[in-house]
Image: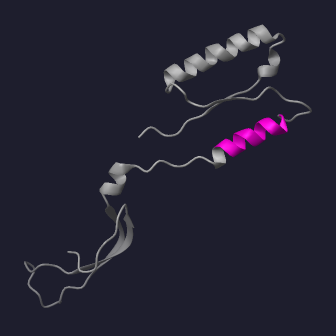
Amino acid sequence: GFPRILGVLTHLDGFKDNKSLRKVKKTLKARFWSEIFDGAKLFHLSGLQHGRYHRVEIQNLARFIATQRSAVLSWRQSHPYLLALRWEDQTEPTAPPSAPRKLDLYGYVYGGRVRAGTQ
């Protein structure tokens, strides 16, 4: 039930030499994986040039987000429920108060279907 998470590292242009940059990337990746889960996706945006990030890096990030599939939550699918926004009492006005009520419910059904004649 954990939602999809991806990390984006920015401000990497502040590192002048590649050795310290690689060390920081490795440390942050290890920390990110320990906090979330091993293998969580982590993107690196190398830095701003003329006030913008590199086009290819942004395209890769956007492509990854666009192609994600949402996981089907099996519990939610197997436990349908009804959200009633309004109801109307269709019971005969002459019926005694102890008689079963006949209601019309208006709203939304989530996680399943309501069959005709369902009580």
Residue at (66, 42) in percent of width and height: 64
Residue at (20, 81) in percent of width and height: 102
Residue at (85, 29) in percent of width and height: 48
Q: Nearer the viewer, residue 68 or 96?
A: 68
User: Looking at the figure, which quarter contains the C terminus?
Assistant: bottom left
Which x, y percent locates residue 7? 62, 30
Which segment is the magenta one?
54-64
Q: Is residue 80 above or below residue 88?
A: above
Decide if residue 47 is on the left or right side of residue 61: right
Q: Is residue 27 above or below residue 99?
A: above
How many dots with numbers?
A: 0
Q: Is residue 91 magenta?
A: no
Asked where in the image residue 8 lies, by quadrant, the reply is top right
Colour setup of the view? one colour
Q: Is residue 17 above or below residue 59?
A: above
Which x, y percent locates residue 2? 44, 37
Residue at (43, 51) in percent of width and height: 72
Asked where in the image residue 91 lies, by quadrant, the reply is bottom left
Which x, y percent locates residue 4? 53, 39
User: Looking at the figure, which quarter contains the N terminus?
Assistant: top left
